[in-house]
């Protein structure tokens, strides 16, 4: 099995002879494989792959028709974790907490949440926290500058997975502002934690949260994000609607379902062999 069509699978298939076609050649598509568009390297690799695993049901729409028959969708599961706490989180500072969780790089639009918080009304109690390290160095300075100038914002930085989950559990909202996602695990982690999500309106979000999910906003629309943050804070009915909608999609992230789908894929190869 190969992960990443352009960075890994392309190099592997280039090294193989045209006559060598093992039945177990599988590639899992990541977001950078298919967004903003499929590259020529990825196309070359996927043409010689026996099976393609997509991480959300709409991902196959990015592929040409000739490849779609190879696609199996397997959504990444998320395990419910025991409720955990962190001394950092138990501060009165966090009356209403919105968390963005992930490593900072341009495609994730990591400063959108902090920027939106600057547009909140003065009576808002919302505080925003980014949890995660920096993959593109420019965001280190951006986070530090935002933390100095924006009293609503805090950057936690790189933490252990258990601590990241504690932040997700403690949050009133999780914000996923990405420009593209291949099937980000953060959706499932927030869903199984029972924390409502505000997400940029991209195929992965619609596929994993629902086409009619009430917490979607246009990519990069800071004003709309700020309005939805304030609505979630001030409207219990809106927040409860988000909770109800994420509760309805919890079965998508069940590890038993993921295991069954991988098992079925393996059995296909066994039968072919």
Image (cartoon, rainbow, N blue to C red):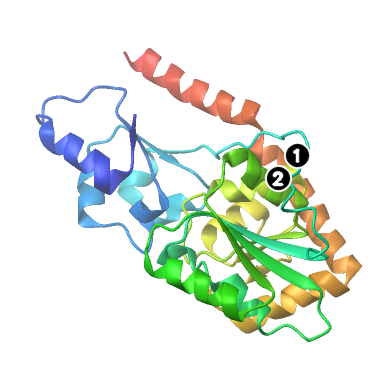
Q: Tell me the SS state at disc 1.
A: loop
Which of the pair 2/85 is nearer the observer? 85
Q: Quadrant of residue 152?
A: bottom right
Would residue 269 be found to the left or right of residue 175 on screen? Answer: left
Q: Is residue 103 above or below residue 227?
A: above
Q: Is residue 202 above or below residue 46?
A: below
Image quadrant in which the N terminus is located: top left
Q: Say which label, 2 or 1, has the lower sequence index.
A: 1
Residue 35 at what x, y percent from top left? 38, 60
Q: Is residue 60 above or below residue 222?
A: above
Q: Residues within 10 Å of mark 1 (few under 14, many from 20)?
A: few
Q: Tell me the SS state at disc 2.
A: helix
Would residue 92 be found to the left or right of residue 47 on screen? Answer: right
Q: Residues within 10 Å of mark 2 (few under 14, many from 20)?
A: some
Which of the pair 22/116 is nearer the observer? 116
Q: Is residue 218 visible?
A: no
Residue 178 at what x, y percent from top left? 51, 64
Q: Quadrant of residue 134?
A: bottom left
Q: Residue at x 63, y 30 (%)?
A: 255
Q: Mark number for residue 117?
A: none
Which of the pair 190/19 is nearer the observer? 190
Q: Is residue 68 visible?
A: yes
Q: Residue at x 59, y 53 (%)?
A: 207
Looking at the image, do the residues carrying marks 2 and 1 touch, with CB atoms under 8 Å apart?
yes
Q: Which residue is mark 1?
A: 84
Image quadrant in which the C terminus is located: top left
Which of the pair 176/16 is nearer the observer? 176
Q: Quadrant of residue 25?
A: top left
Q: Mark number for residue 166?
A: 2
Q: Is residue 128 above or below residue 39?
A: below
Would residue 270 be found to the left or right of residue 86 on screen? Answer: left
């Amino acid at each position: 099995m190969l992960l990443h069509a352009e960075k890994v699978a392309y190099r592997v298939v280039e090294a193989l002879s045209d006559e060598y076609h093992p039945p177990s050649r599988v590639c899992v598509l990541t977001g950078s494989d298919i967004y903003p568009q499929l590259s020529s390297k990825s196309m070359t690799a996927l043409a010689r792959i026996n099976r393609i695993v997509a991480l959300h049901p709409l991902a196959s729409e990015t592929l040409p028709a000739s490849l779609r028959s190879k696609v199996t969708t397997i959504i990444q599961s998320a395990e419910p974790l025991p409720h955990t706490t962190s001394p950092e989180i138990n501060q009165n500072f966090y009356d209403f907490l919105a968390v963005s969780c992930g490593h900072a790089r341009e495609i994730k639009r990591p400063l959108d949440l902090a920027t939106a918080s600057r547009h909140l009304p003065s009576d808002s109690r919302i505080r925003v926290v980014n949890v995660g390290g920096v993959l593109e160095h420019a965001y280190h300075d951006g986070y530090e500058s935002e933390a100095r100038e924006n009293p609503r914002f805090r950057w936690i930085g790189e933490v252990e997975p258990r601590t990241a989950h504690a932040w997700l559990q403690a949050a009133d909202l999780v914000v996923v502002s990405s420009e593209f996602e291949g099937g980000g695990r953060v959706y499932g982690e927030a869903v199984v934690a029972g924390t409502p999500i505000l997400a940029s309106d991209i195929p992965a979000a619609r596929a994993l949260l629902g086409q009619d999910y009430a917490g979607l906003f246009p990519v990069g629309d800071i004003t709309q994000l700020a309005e939805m943050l304030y609505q979630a804070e001030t409207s219990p009915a809106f927040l409860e609607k988000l909770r109800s909608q994420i509760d309805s999609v919890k079965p998508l992230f069940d590890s038993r379902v993921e295991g069954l789908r991988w098992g079925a894929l393996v059995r296909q190869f066994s039968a072919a062999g």
